[in-house]
Image (cartoon, rainbow, N blue to C red):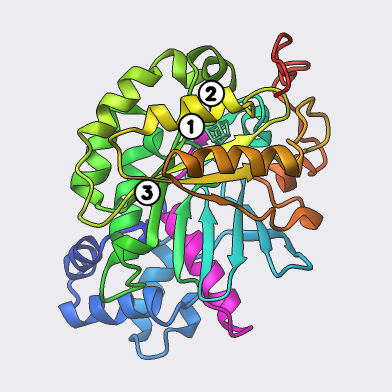
Amino acid sequence: MTPPIPVTGLTRAELTDLVTGWGEKPFRARQLWSWLHVKLARDWAAMSDLARPFRARLMASCAPLRPAIRAHQVSADGTEKWLLGLADGQVIETVYIPEDARGTLCVSSQAGCSLNCPFCHTGRQGFARNLTSAEIVEQVLLARGELLLRARRVTNVVLMGMGEPLYNYDAVARAVHILMDDAGLAIGSRKITLSTAGVVPRLDAVGRELGVNLAISLHAAREEVRNRLVPLNRKYGLGDLRAALLNYPLKSGRRVTWEYVLLDGVNDRLDDARAFGAYLQGIPSKINLIPFNPWPGTAFRPSSPEVILRFQEALHRQGFVTVIRDSRGADIAAACGQLKGQLPGARPRSAGAEAPASGDSTP
Ligand code: SF4
């Protein structure tokens, strides 16, 4: 049996090829594209100006247009989180973060993650599979549609949810092109950020082929600390990462964003801040310091507000724009992987792997 076609994951050109290949006129493809990406239709029945036989063919040949909503939570601060069930039973998370002038949607690129960063709740739950481009795009379509009903907007998209996007590059790249299409969702390249733990061989493609903003989850600028916090560092070390970023095709006026989760006694000393600043020399940068949002079972602790401020000040003194990110949605477990971890039957990948290494001294 032919598998159902994931139409939401087709570019406009591919959708046109599909529809004209069925003997339909090209304008039918334009109508269908508009129903999918402008009018945000959730089912075929809504597509009232499509001829019945065409709609019947779509219904018979194509995959459903949305994942199932397994859970939806709204935080007191307005952050919203969806737990989405995919066709094969996998579950992923999508989080909406409203701010004054914008609304940012954090989408997942994989079901789980293979990188096993010990402070990350998603990493602790293991890796299931890559998402398809349709499954990535549908997170945006679903959230945009749901939020429109409450007069809220998705203006920005960050690929910062579950998974390492550069280990699913082809599907992510296709999804990004669909999100950016001017005749569809039209989310500009400046409004999309791809966050990676540092898959060095793929970085150049992000700049050259996608042109979106780049964020690096650094979390430590000392090799031995990063080896523990981001195990990918053992494959692509700090030196390789820095060399790639010194040569990164950054668009004019843009900067690389550095994400740094502050963990009490692990990576929050003044020495760490100095090493961080030295590491960034020569790379146009802005820094997001992220207070750790503890999850049940973790042995990591958040740095105190005083330590976080001191760390920020040390980076300011070295000349870096440094923002302390608000902890959003704490009451709905909005940190990546937390809601999925609350599902009945969710299990961590192994016991005891999350403890911070001994020997790290407090600042
Ligand atoms: S921090 Fe990112 S790369 Fe590391 S395990 Fe979590 S989702 Fe994966």
The numbered disc on residue 229 is none
In what element is the residue under mark 3? loop
The mark nearer the N terminus, 3 or 2, is 3
The mark nearer the N terminus, 1 or 3, is 3
| Of marks 3 and 2, the one in the foreground | 2
Q: Which residue is at a point 17% across and 70% down the rendered structure image?
A: 20
Bin the neighbour count of mark 1 within 10 Å (Cα to Cα): few under 14, some 14-19, many 20 and up. Answer: many
Towards the viewer: 192 or 341:
192
- Disc 1 beta carbon < 8 A from ligand 1? no
| Of marks 1 and 3, the one in the foreground | 1
- Disc 3 beta carbon < 8 A from ligand 1? no
> Is 147 colored magenta in this rendering?
yes
Residue 363 relative to residue 182: left or right: right
In what element is the residue under mark 1? loop
Residue 122 relative to residue 23: left or right: right
Task: Read off the magenta span.
Answer: 129-153
Marks 2 and 1 close (CB-CB < 8 Å) = yes
| Of marks 2 and 1, the one in the foreground | 1
Q: Which residue is at a point 68% across and 64% down the rendered structure image?
A: 79
**What amino acid type should be assigned to the residue bearing mark 2?**
Val
In what element is the residue under mark 2? loop
The mark nearer the N terminus, 2 or 1, is 1
Could you say where residue 319 lies in the image, as x and y percent from the top left?
Answer: 41, 44
Residue labelled with disc 2: 230
Residue 128 relative to residue 252: left or right: right
Quarter of the view holding residue 252: bottom left
Residue labelled with disc 3: 2
